[in-house]
Amino acid sequence: MESFLSNNQETPQKWSQISWEFLSKVRQNSPLIHCITNYVSMDLAANTLLAAGASPAMLHSSDEIPDFTPQVDALYINVGTLTAAVLPAMKSAAEIAVKHGKSWVFDPVAAGCSSFRLRACLDLLSLKPTVVRGNGSEIIALSRASMGDTKGADSLHESRDALEAAKSLAQATGAIVAVTGAVDIITDGIQVIGARNGVQMMQKITATGCSVTALIAAFVAVDPTHAFEATVAALSVFGIAGELGMQDAKGPASLRVNLIDSLYALDQVSILQHAKISPLS
Ligand SMILES: Nc1ncnc2c1ncn2[C@@H]1O[C@H](COP(=O)(O)OP(=O)(O)O)[C@@H](O)[C@H]1O
Ligand SMILES: Cc1ncsc1CCOP(=O)(O)O
Ligand SMILES: [Mg+2]
């Protein structure tokens, strides 16, 4: 089968085909994803990875990282319930991942809400994540390296408000930067893609952001040379699972369950029908 990844032309189906290619590859390869994530998201992030076909491992101890991190296909770090005790494990896992040529993906939850957290996020950013995914307020805080204008783990900004911040953060760090919201924005500092899948109710389920960042790690793991495309694909696939899951959901709790079922069952026809991905200016 010809891969749409090698096609430089913007055809209408290019991005939806790429999204399907990535999901298929995750199902085939079942990448092992080392997750150091917050207590709130542990369950949903692990179940998201399993439903997509990946293999999650939530290991947090510094004592295990030197043995374990070199074995994994990608690393996911999320600072949602950050403490001074766990930060060294995060830093050492990131360093080991980079040393062993593994991708690592960063979720800077509530980056601007305290100086301790902001400093920790900036330190982690200096350890060269492959992808950073946050909401609008988080990406703006990181880009300006300043506190404030945030509401804890929730965003005070639309993703569009953070477009320029995302571009400059990508240019400054060399990471792919993704900002989620009604439109998910993905940039490497030059090209910008918008993915418009998902439903607003996803904001009413805690850890959907954390879970989609974990999914990005799984997508990047199966093709690290195409981290930009992997990020677009993961965001679109998760959004489509949300849309399909919403069809018979009564509220956030049933959507949470349906989203995982829809992700597990997602097929090529649904992705080609529902993906809404295009360049943004
Ligand atoms: N208004 C919206 N419409 C559609 N999808 C949304 C909307 N807001 C958030 N999402 C989706 O919900 C998920 C979590 O995004 P977001 O709420 O921005 O992250 P966080 O939980 O980190 O603040 C993403 O998949 C995103 O695309
Ligand atoms: C509510 C909360 N508090 C600390 S971490 C966390 C979960 C945040 O999850 P998300 O960023 O995916 O909404
Ligand atoms: Mg978040």
Image: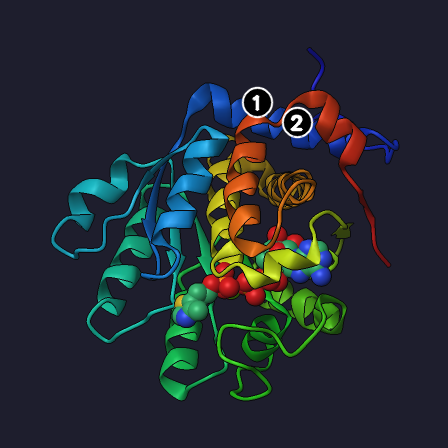
Q: Residue at x 49, y 79 (%)?
A: 152
Proximity of marks 1 and 2: CB atoms separated by less than 8 Å: yes
Q: Residues within 10 Å of mark 2 (few under 14, many from 20)?
A: many
> Of residues 99 and 243, which is closer to you in this image?
243
Tag on residue 24? 1
As rendered, which of 276 and 144 lies closer to the eye? 276
* Residue toward you, 145 or 139: 139
The local secondary structure at tag 2 comes to helix
Q: Nearer the viewer, residue 225 or 15?
A: 15
Question: What is the image's colouring?
Answer: rainbow
Judge left or right: residue 266 versus residue 16: left
Q: Position of residue 174 (x, y in %)?
A: 57, 58
* Number of numbered callouts drawn: 2
Seen in the picture, residue 19 relative to 249 is either above or below; the reply is above
Residue 20, labelled with which disc?
Answer: 2
Above/below status of 26 relative to 181:
above
Is the CB–ligand 1 distance for label 1 below 8 Å? no
Q: Is residue 96 left or right of residue 178?
A: left
Q: CA distance from mark 1 to mark 2?
A: 6 Å
